Amino acid sequence: MSSSRQTVKDTALVAGGAGFLGSHLCEALLASGHRVLCVDNFLTGSEDNIAALIHHPRFRMIKRDICAPFDPGEAIDRVYNLACAASPPHYQNDPVHTMRTCVVGTLNLLELAERHGARFLQASTSEVYGDPEMHPQTESYTGHVNCTGPRACYDEGKRAAEAMCFDFLRAGRADVRVARIFNTYGPRMHPKDGRIVSNLVVQALSGNPLTIYGDGSQTRSFCYVSDLIDGLMRLMNVADSPGAPVNLGNPSEFTVQELADLVLRMTNSRSPLVFKALPVDDPKRRRPDIARANRLLGWEPRVALPDGLLATIRHFEAFVARSAKAKQPAHAMPAEAYMGIQKE
Ligand SMILES: NC(=O)c1ccc[n+]([C@@H]2O[C@H](COP(=O)([O-])OP(=O)(O)OC[C@H]3O[C@@H](n4cnc5c(N)ncnc54)[C@H](O)[C@@H]3O)[C@@H](O)[C@H]2O)c1
C-alpha cells in the first residue's frame, strides 16, 4: 500500500501546518529534504508560525479548510493530518466545526491519500482515553469519555476519526498510522489558548497570578515539541503500518502544582497562585505508556522538563515584551473561556 516513490525528496502534505506542532513538523520535513505542502485555514494557526518557511523553494502554502474536499494538483506521498484546534477554548468555540473537522475533514484527507497512494498519519490524542480509570494509559485501554459533555466535540471527534482511519487500513484503501499525542509544549504554542504550560509561563512573565484549576494535585506528562515531531516522523517512516494506535508522550508525570512551582522558579517570578474550579470532565491523571513506541519506533523522549521549559520561556519572553511595547495585555485565557466551567 505504501507509495512506490519513497525517496528523500517525497512530497508531504501537512494539514494544520501553520499551527504549533504543524509548523515544527513542516520545518523538520524541509530540513530532511521533503517538499512540503502546508494546508491550513488559520483558525488557530498563524502566518508568524510559518514566516521562516514561506519563501523556501520546497514549501507551498495552501490556504483552505479541510472540511471541503480538495486536491493540490501535484503528486503527494505522505499526508500528515494535524488540522484541528487543540485547546479547549478554541475547540469549544465552534464545537460543530471541530467535529466536522475531525470527521469530514479526516475523511477528505483519507480519500486524498487513497487517490495518491500516499501514506497517512493521523494526529490523534490522549483525550480519546477521556478521564482514564487505567494508569498509565496503554493503547489497548478503550477509554472513559463523556459523549455529551463540552469536550465531546474533540474527544469523540478524534475517536470517530481513528475509527475511520482503521477502516481505511483494514479495507486496504490507505496505509494509515495513528499517533495518540499526549500534552506537548514548546515555542509557538498559542500564548492565549488556555493550555497549561503557555498559561502559567505567560502569567509568570507578565507578573500576573498563576491560575490553577482544581487543587493542583491532578497530574500531566509534558513532552517537548522536538521529541514529539521526531516520534511522528518515525511513525510515518516505519516500513509497515503498526496497524494499531501508538502513544507518543513523555511518561514523566508531574502535578500541576509542581509545574507551577517550577515555572515560578525558572522565571524568578513572585506571582501568587490562584485556585479556580476544574473544567467539566477535566482528567485527573494522564501518563502515557510508551512501550509500543519504544519497541516499534525505537523512540523515547530526550528533553527533560526544565530544558524544554527554558526554551519555551525564552520564546514567551519575546511575546510578553512585544505585548508590553504595544500596551496589550499578555494575560492568558480567562477561566470563563472554558465552556462548561463551574463558576465559583
Ligand atoms: N499540542 C498538543 O499537546 C496535542 C496533544 C494531543 C493532540 N494534538 C493534536 O495535534 C494536532 C495539532 O495540534 P496543535 O497543538 O499544533 O494545535 P494548533 O491549534 O496550534 O494547530 C492546529 C492547526 O490546524 C488548523 N486547522 C484547524 N481546523 C482546520 C480546518 N478545518 N481546516 C484546515 N486547518 C485547520 C489551525 O488553523 C491550526 O493551524 C491537532 O490535531 C491536535 O488534536 C495536539
Image (cartoon, rainbow, N blue to C red):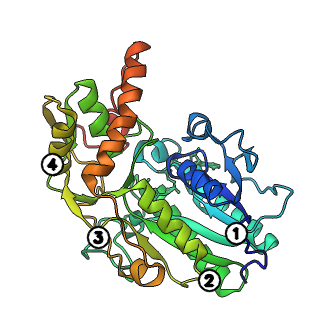
Q: Secondary structure at mark 3?
A: loop
Q: Secondary structure at mark 2?
A: loop
Residue 185 coordinates in the image, percent (x, y): 38, 50
User: How many residues crowd around disc 4 within 10 Å: few (fewer than 14), some, or many (20 or more)?
Assistant: some
User: How many residues crowd around disc 3 within 10 Å: few (fewer than 14), some, or many (20 or more)?
Assistant: many
**Mark 4 vs mark 2: which is more N-terminal?**
2
Q: Amino acid at mark 2?
A: Ala
Q: CA distance from mark 2 to mark 1?
A: 19 Å
Q: Is residue 189 visible?
A: yes
Q: CA distance from mark 4 to mark 3?
A: 20 Å
Residue occupying the far right of the picture:
73
Disc 2: which residue? 239
Disc 1: which residue? 110
Q: Nearer the viewer, mark 2 or mark 1?
A: 2
Residue 248 coordinates in the image, percent (x, y): 41, 68
Q: Residue at x 19, y 29 (%)?
A: 209
Q: Secondary structure at mark 4?
A: helix
Disc 3: which residue? 132
Disc 2 + disc 3, Cβ < 8 Å: no
Tell me if residue 155 comes above or below residue 98 in the rendering: below
Q: CA distance from mark 2 to mark 3?
A: 32 Å
Q: Residue at x 15, y 39 (%)?
A: 265
Disc 4 + disc 1, Cβ < 8 Å: no
Q: Nearer the viewer, residue 267 or 222?
A: 267
Q: Nearer the viewer, mark 4 or mark 3?
A: 4
Disc 4 + disc 3, Cβ < 8 Å: no
Q: Secondary structure at mark 1?
A: helix
Q: Amino acid at mark 1?
A: Leu
